[in-house]
């Protein structure tokens, strides 16, 4: 356990941030999964900008690495283009 007041505060902050990041990561994964399950080409093309924006926001917040974000967007773009 921390002995300094600042260390106690840091522990509280870290816990809040951990839970927030966990929620964001879960929602990102659910959004990607629901996008991949779309079968209609028009529906996926309409949703494509929204999912890219979601991925970009996650990368900006540090939830995922920026190169992973690029890889995800590239793969989803190929899926959309082939549909």
Image (cartoon, rainbow, N blue to C red):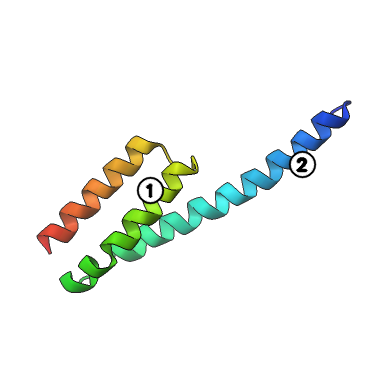
Disc 2 marks which residue?
Answer: 12
The quadrant where residue 10 appears: top right
Which is more toward the observer, 32 or 56? 56
Precedes in sequence: disc 2 or disc 1: 2
Residue 51 vs 63, above or below: the answer is below
Disc 1 marks which residue?
Answer: 56
| Residue drawn at the location 56% of the way across and 55% of the way down | 23
Secondary element under disc 1, as helix, strand or loop, is: helix
Task: Single out the mark in the foreground, 2 or 1.
Answer: 1
Q: Position of residue 67 (x, y in %)?
A: 33, 36
Which is more toward the observer, 32 or 77? 77
The quadrant where residue 45 appears: bottom left
Q: Position of residue 11 (x, y in %)?
A: 76, 36
Q: Is residue 18 left or right of residue 70?
A: right
Which is more toward the observer, 33 or 52? 52
Q: Position of residue 43 (x, y in %)?
A: 23, 73
């Amino acid at each position: 356990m921390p002995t300094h007041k600042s260390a106690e505060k840091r522990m509280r902050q870290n816990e809040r941030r951990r839970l927030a990041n966990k929620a964001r990561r879960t929602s990102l994964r659910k959004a990607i999964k629901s996008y991949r399950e779309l079968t209609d080409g028009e529906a996926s093309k309409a949703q494509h900008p929204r999912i890219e924006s979601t991925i970009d926001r996650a990368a900006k917040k540090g939830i995922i690495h920026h190169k992973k974000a690029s890889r995800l967007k590239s793969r989803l773009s190929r899926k959309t283009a082939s549909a």
